[in-house]
Each structure stands twice: as C-alpha cells, then as structure tokens.
Amino acid sequence: MKKIAGCAILMMLVACATDRPARVGSDRDAHGCIGSAGYTYSPMRHQCVRIWEEGVALLSVEEKGPYTSAVFVLDSDKHDRKELFLDMGKSPVILTSKKADVPTWQDSANKWKLTQGTEGWQLLEKGTLRYRSAAH
C-alpha cells in the first residue's frame, strides 16, 4: 500500500512539474533571438533586431485581401541593400540597389521593387503597388 501511495505521489509531482508554462525569454531561435521579446534575426545584419524599432513600416494599400497590413524594411550599413520583412514566419527578402532616376532596390527574382521618391517609400509586387509609407 505504501508503494502504491508513493508511486501516486511521485506521478502527481512529475505531472505538476511538466505543466509549468515556459519562462518568458526561453524561446530563443536558432540564432539566439528571443521572439517573445520581439526580436527577429536579420541575415543581412547578422544580429537580432526589433524590426518595428529599426525598420521603416510600409502599410498595405489594400483594405482587404491576401496581403499583410504592414511590412518592414531594414537598411544595411552601406545603404546598397535593404531587407524586406513580409511575413514574420518566413525569411526576409534581400533587395539590392538598382540604377534608376529615384533610389530603387529590387530582389533577385524581380518580384519586389522598393522605391524612395517624393511620394515616400513604395513597394511594388510585379509592377503593382502593394505597400507605401504611412506619411500619406
């Protein structure tokens, strides 16, 4: 009887120990970035960043549809590349500068084109305006 009671108590203790919620900050990714603290890994910068603090927010021009309501663009140290965060669950897209009348960056697949002109920042997907800076 003592063995059964001892086993029951031991099982309850083990069950209680495994039901504890994860500690805040214990969710480091493969790069050591803490997602619960708002950090995302930037392959271009090789560091963890909070994109809403260091990046430029571009808002969707569509009220409804398949597009995220906002995307973020991070600048490189040399300003010749930009890092485009379209979806927090996916890797960012690297954009490189292109010679044009207005400052322009484009991805290697020519799907995304970022411009900075008198109208502010604009992000086009295959020639269609999808996002722009909030100052409109």
Image (cartoon, rainbow, N blue to C red):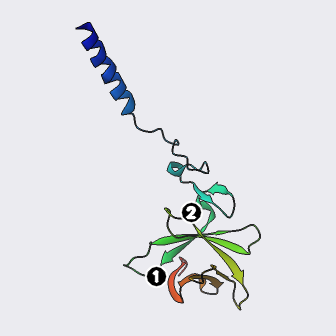
User: What residue appears at the point 67 percent right and 55 percent down from the top-left corner?
Assistant: 47
Foreground residue among 97 and 10 = 10
Q: Which mark is residue 103?
A: none
According to the picture, the residue beneath numbered tag 1 turns out to be 61
Residue on which disc 2 sits: 52
Q: Label 1, secondary structure: give it.
A: loop
Residue 7: percent from left, percent from top: 30, 16
Of residues 49 and 44, the one nearer the viewer is 44
Q: State if disc 2 and disc 1 touch (CB < 8 Å).
A: no
Q: Name the image quarter holding residue 104.
A: bottom right
Front-lying residue, 120 or 60: 60
Q: For residue 82, what is the image quadrant? A: bottom right
Q: Position of residue 133 (x, y in %)?
A: 56, 77
135 w.r.t. 7: above or below: below
| Label 2 environment density (alpha carbons within 10 Å; few <14, some 14–19, many ≥20) | some
The residue most toward the bottom is: 101
User: Left or right: 38 with respect to 3?
Assistant: right
Figure quadrant of residue 43: bottom right
The amino acid on which the numbered mark 2 sits, given as a three-letter code, is: Trp
Q: Earlier in the sequence, mark 1 or mark 2?
A: 2
Q: Residue at x 26, y 7 (%)?
A: 2
* In this rendering, position of residue 60 left or right of residue 108: left
